[in-house]
Structure formats: structure tokens, C-alpha cells
Amino acid sequence: MSEKVLMKGNEAIAEAAIVAGCRHYFGYPITPQTEIAAYMAKKMPKIGGTFLQAESEIAAINMVYGVSSTGKRVMTSSSSPGISLKGEGLSYMAGCDLPALVVNVQRGGPGLGGIQPSQSDYFQSTRGGGHGDYHMIVLAPASVQEMAELTVKGFELADEYGITSMILADGTIGQMMEPVSLDFDLKPMPEKPWATTGTKMAREHNITNSLSLVPEELEKFNFARYEKYKKIEENECRYEEYMTEDADIILCAFGIAARVSKNAVNEARSKGIKVGLIRPITLWPFPKAPFAKAATHAKAFISVELSMGQMIEDIKLSTECKVPVYLCNRAGGMIPDPKMVMDMIEKVKAGEN
Amino acid sequence: MVVFDRPHALIDVPLHYCPGCTHGIVHRLVAEVIDELGIEGKTIGIAPVGCSVMAYDYFNCDMIEAAHGRAPAVATGVKRSDPENHIVFTYQGDGDLASIGMAETVHAAARNENITVIFINNAIYGMTGGQMAPTSLPGQVTQTSPYGRDVNHCGYPIKVCEMLSQIDGAEYLERVTVNNVKNVRNAKKAIKKAFQNQIDGKGFSLVEVISSCPTNWGMSPKKALEWIDEKMIPYYPLGVYKDRSANKEEA
């Protein structure tokens, strides 16, 4: 068994990124993710890497764009309002099929909002966030260990498919401390013949570009990109199922909401109510299969979210609205407790009887 | 014996620029400098948004197309990816560099980012059809200042070299133009120095090239070149605004 260390979720992301071979980090201060930049500022100069505090989130994501164009692993991190600013760069990176890792440790919004945990950037991240037709791979850790594992996975998927991976965390997972193992089997990084590292006078020039003024061509690029997305949907859906097999009521939650929900499942089971949990780990691609399967036997779904109800739409789409989907939510930085979820379970059960 | 040829760093394709536009001259100067310094194989150019957005199709070195105004940030990433082996230049217009990308410009200078910036100032947004630029002259008629730029309403033009000369980090700032043979030769010297500085590790070097836009100025190419002398240069005087190493050598 590998050695475990006690770390904050945000620090686990930073250390895992270094383990994954990331030597370039660009960011701009924003709560609640400052530990990532602080960790990188300390570590990077000692290992021949680059930490640079950019003048803005916009500049930071464009520095990422620059390093990624040269084929190296690179990341940035921010929180909700900062991610909005990065939206332009994320769209350009998608248009150039550039790999990178972007971390969003979400806080409550809209606007300046608050600094407490939230999941209200679900739509923004799973639908792309910037302009144009595109997706990012969106990974939702529910523990400090997963913060580290999904960081490594995020880099690997980004390189494999030529896409930006986003870690969609929240302030709770970012700030909490848990034991974590940083022992990973790393996949070798794929060749990147498209990288703009200078021709060395030995090849045609490479161009990183998202401009395409001929509509027929731009359409072709978009269709090709969606073929890639289809492959990702087929191969990369990740989720955890907990006691779903015989469940009448299925809770659906990711991140910190999934941990609260798991407690509620245990409590409900102790009272003899058959409740299960589906926890999507990839939010895009959304794991439709377990939801479709559960809809064949469950009588109701409850989406537990730290938002006004965003993932609930994907649950309704995945189950084709065959059974009712209820919302159990807090917002603005508040977190539902297991009792609130338990009350909702009992309400739904009473309603169906 | 060949006495005049296309520089290797410039691809043999027709440029899309309007007749009389000086982008072609500046492209050639940059390419000649890349050839003469023998750096094409390690150079990565960053194209802007604006008339020169398709510069990536003209330069033979590796090229990256940046979002509007973001070229200095992209260049920062490319340079810091491999500082020993990457020569990085941005090629930007006045809207790109001095309006939407002002923060990126100022902070790249403040960090003394070891890059070369070629700044085309033609006092107008060309590609979008002739709107008022941050460098449009007082009284200048454009599509969005149809009664002439009223400084009481929309403020004054920005003098980029003068402004950046106040920044400790900036290494070299020079304003040139390309409206006659003598000025073209001076412009080339400045561009070469801006690249040489990067090779020598001296840092942020920017050459502002006062340029013409006959199409959107509504002038013949010849008249546009004269207008540079008559109107542009009095407002934007040519010269070296900062040369940190030269000052050091004198001191």
C-alpha cells in the first residue's frame, strides 16, 4: 500500500498536477482556491517549472493557450467569477483542440456572489461556458483523493483527445483535509506533431488557429470535433452507483452533495426505505446509462444539488422523464444536510404511496 | 546574380491586404530580419485579430492565432514554455494592442517579458471597416466618429511608446514609419534590434510602426503616405523612447 499524506483538496490538485508532469501554472488570486496558486508558487521554482501570477484571468488562460500550443502540460485554476472571464480563452482552446487542465473551485453566484461552496456552474461547465459549439471534459471529485486522481486523469484525457479538462470542485472539497495517496500509474504522453515549437527548418510550419472564414470548412471542423465528442461519450463516462439495484428512490448528486446523499441513503436503508445513489464523476460526458437503467425499476429520482437545479435537467433527459425527478437543493453557499435529504425522501415516499 | 529576392521567412503567396497598405512592407521587414538572424526554425509568431489576423499564412515560421488583444499573454506562455529555444514575436494592430489588449501589453512590458512586439499603428480599425481606434487622431473622421473624433466626448489618442516608456520593465521602445525608403530602412534597423534584444535576453522590445490605411482613411495610397508626414508624425513623433541597455552603457 502506498504512503498517504494529509492534504487539503486544493493542495492535492496542485501536487497531483506536478506528479502528472505539469510544469506550467498561471493564475489570478480568487477565493476559495488560493491554496493551489500558493502551492505552485512554492514548488514550481524548485523543480524547474514556471509559476506566474497573471494580470487577469483572461491573461492567465491565454498564457495557458500559449504553453499548450507548444505541447506541454499546463494548467490554471480559479473560482466561478474568474471562470467566466476565462470563457473566451476556453472557447479558443476548443476551437484549436488544445489540451489543458482548468480547475473551478466553485463559489455561490451569480455576480460576485459569495465565497462559500456551490455547484451553480454546472450549466456553464457542461455546456462549454464560452461561445460556439464545444464541450470540455468535466470531472467532479467528491473527496481529496479524487481531487488528485481526477487531476491526473484530466491531463491524460486532455492529451488523448485534444480537449480541455475541467475539474469542477466546490469550496468544501477544496478546503477539507483528508489522507491522500499520490502514487499513480502514469500513461506516457502522446506525441504532439502539431505543436508550435519552431520548425527547426525540418518541417512545414505548424499553425494553432481557430479562424475559418469558409463556412463549408468551419462546418466540417465542427462535425469532426463532435465525432471526437461522441467517442468521449462512448468511452469516458464515469460514475459511482451505491445501493441502486433494488432502489425505489434514486438520489443523484456529485461532489460534496454526493457525500451528504450517501449518509441519507444509509439512514433511509436503516429505516427500511429502499434508496440508492448515482454519483456522476464525469458531468460531461454525462453518464446517461445508469440513469436510464434505474428508471426501469425506480419510482422516483431526487437530484440533490448546491444550485437552483441544474443537473436535474440532464437526469430528466437521461431518464426521458419516465419517472418523476424531484429537486432537493440549497444555494448561495449553503449545503443541504442529511436530514434535509431524508425529509425529502420521506416526502417523496409518502407522495407515491 | 540575385540581388533582390523574397525572404525565406515569407511564404510565396499573394497577401490579402488592400493596395497601398503598409502591412506588406512590415511583413517583409520582419521576414528579412528573421532570415538575417537565422532564427526562422526557432521562431514562433503570434498573429492578432485585425487586418493581419491571417499573418499565420504568410510567415514561414510556426504561428499561433491569438484572441483579440491577447497576443502578449499567449507569447508569454510560448516564451516561458522554453525560454532558451523559443524566439517569440507578436504582430498587433492599434485596436488589438492599445484598446482591448492594453492590460496584456502593459503587464508584458512590466514583467520585461523577453519577447518582440511589432505594433502597427494606422489610427483605425481596418478589418471591421474603419472604426475609431484608440490611436485615431483628434478630429479624425471614422465610421464611429463621423463628425470627427471629439476629444471631449471620447477622449484622446493613446501614445503607446510614451506611455510604456514610464514602465521600469520595458527594455526597448522605438517608433518608426515606412512611408519612404529612408524610413523603411530605419524601421528595419529597429525591428532587427528588437529581435536581437530577445536573442541577447534583454527583454521586452516593442517597435511601433506608423502605418497607412488608404482604404479606411479614404485616400489614394500616395496621399495616405503624405498624410503620415502631415498628420500622424506630428502627433506621434518618431524616435527611440526607451533603450535601457544603451542608457546603461552610457552610464
Image (cartoon, rainbow, N blue to C red):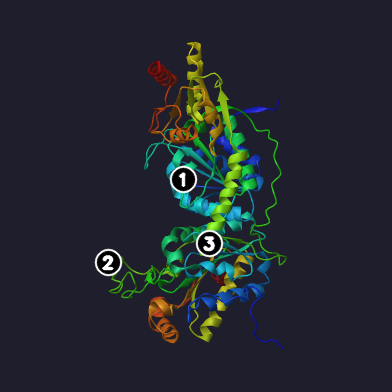
Q: Which residue bears the numbered disc 3?
A: A216
Q: Residue at x 39, y 78 (%)?
A: B217
Let me know if residue A93 appears in the view. Answer: no
Neighbour tally class for label 1: few under 14, some 14-19, many 20 plus, Cα within 10 Å: many
On residue A83, the disc is 1
Q: Residue at x 40, y 78 (%)?
A: B232
Task: Tell me residue B15's x, y (percent).
Answer: 55, 75
Chain under numbered label 3:
A
Which element is circle 1 on? helix
Res. A289 image quadrant: top right
**Amino acid type at mark 1:** Ile
Res. B244 image quadrant: bottom right
In the picture as drawn, the residue positioned furthest to the top comes out as A271
Front disc: 1 or 3 = 3
Which sits in the foreground, A8 or B171? A8
On residue B153, the disc is 2
Which sits in the foreground, B25 or B180? B25
On residue B115, the disc is none
The C terminus of chain A lies in quadrant: top left
Chain under numbered label 2:
B
Front disc: 2 or 1 = 1
**Disc 1 from disc 3: Cα separation:** 32 Å
Which element is circle 3 on? helix
**Disc 2 from disc 1: Cα separation:** 34 Å
Q: Residue at x 54, y 22 (%)?
A: A244
**Amino acid type at mark 3:** Glu
Which sits in the foreground, A199 or B151? A199
Horizontal side of A13 relative to A83 (left or right) equals right
